[in-house]
Image (cartoon, grey):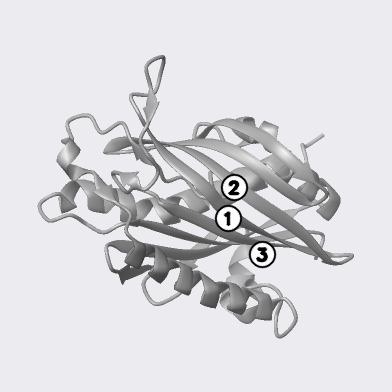
């Protein structure tokens, strides 16, 4: 499951008016910094599965009250949500929502129905396909679009694994395996080489938790993405995209997931 669409949508550019000089290359020190950050984040997530509160909202009475009242939460997982690394920025956000009347079986069925994500998460997801499945392991394709000053388009592939903890609790982990920026989407579109583009999204990994209780299902997502840093002279154009889309995409994903799971009124 991805806030990728929702998981959360960041993308490359139609870049009308932006010169090729604004293209950048993803370099080894940036990748190394992101991988190191991910190792620590995954260790913290794994620890939360077996010790202390399972849900992020249960660690705060204010959060728990907010989601119980129907609010969608999206907060930085650290002090700022953005971490500067050599040549890039890491964005780390955690969000939660409660869906009254939902059950775990229907929730998992919906989030695992990747061919239907293009309908659930439209207009941010314009195409979605299941490339392969082996048990609870999925390899999926998502084409994501986001407009904010520029129109952002990415072809992305993800490895996703779902794991059952007990009758009422599941979690999933999703890791991007390929992200390609699309230029001139349409009949004559082309993909830029991954990692040699405009740097609007180089990585997007998500950790999800699902718990059925209190007459519904709690859904939580931690979305961790990697983008370029802010180029000198183009901060007015680039900054709003790379700094606001992570939170916005996470919020949209949670909202659209809740809407898809909310039982229809008789």
Q: What is the C-alpha distance between the residues marked 1 and 3?
A: 30 Å
Q: Are marks 2 and 1 in contact (CB under 8 Å)?
A: yes
Q: Alpha-carbon neighbours of circle 2 within 10 Å: few (<14), some, or many (≥20)?
A: many
Rendered view: 136 above or below 223? above
- Residue at the far top: name it: 187
Looking at the picture, how far across and down is residue 249, in whole percent?
A: 47, 49
In this rendering, which labeled residue sits more in front, label 2 or label 3?
Answer: 2
Q: Looking at the image, which residue is at 31% across and 69% down?
A: 85
Give the mark nearer the N terminus: 2 vs 3: 3
In which quadrant of the rendered image does the C terminus lie? top right
Q: What is the C-alpha distance between the residues marked 2 and 3?
A: 31 Å
On residue 140, which mark appears?
Answer: none
- Residue at image mark 2: 158
Q: Is residue 184 left or right of residue 212?
A: left
Give the mark nearer the N terminus: 1 vs 3: 3
- Residue at image mark 1: 175
- Residue at image mark 3: 68
Q: Looking at the image, which residue is at 56% across and 48% down?
A: 253
Decide if residue 43 is in sight here.
Answer: yes
Element under label 2?
Answer: strand
**Most foreground residue, 67 or 122:** 122
Element under label 1?
Answer: strand
């Amino acid at each position: 499951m991805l806030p990728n669409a929702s998981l959360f949508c960041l993308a490359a550019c139609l870049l009308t008016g932006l010169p090729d000089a604004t293209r950048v290359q993803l370099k080894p020190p940036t990748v190394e910094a992101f991988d190191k950050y991910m190792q620590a984040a995954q260790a913290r997530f794994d620890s939360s599965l077996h010790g202390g509160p399972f849900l992020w909202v249960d660690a705060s009475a204010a959060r728990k009250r907010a989601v119980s009242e129907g609010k969608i939460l999206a907060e930085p997982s650290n002090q700022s949500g953005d971490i500067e690394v050599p040549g890039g920025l890491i964005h780390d956000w955690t969000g939660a929502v409660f869906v009254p009347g939902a059950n775990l079986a229907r929730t998992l069925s919906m989030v695992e129905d990747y061919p239907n994500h293009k309908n659930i998460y439209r207009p941010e997801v314009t195409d979605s396909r299941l490339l392969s499945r082996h048990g609870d392991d999925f390899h999926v394709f998502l084409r994501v679009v986001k407009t904010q000053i520029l129109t952002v388009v990415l072809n992305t592939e993800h490895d996703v694994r779902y794991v059952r903890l007990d009758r009422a609790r599941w979690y999933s982990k999703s890791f991007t395996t390929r992200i390609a920026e699309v230029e001139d989407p349409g009949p004559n579109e082309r993909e830029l080489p991954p990692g040699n583009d405009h740097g609007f999204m180089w990585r997007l990994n998500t950790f999800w938790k699902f718990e059925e209780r209190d007459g519904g299902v709690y859904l939580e997502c931690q979305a961790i993405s990697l983008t370029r840093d802010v180029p000198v002279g183009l901060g007015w154009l680039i900054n709003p995209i790379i700094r606001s889309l992570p939170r916005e995409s996470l919020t949209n994903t949670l909202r659209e997931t809740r809407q898809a799971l909310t039982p229809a009124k008789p």
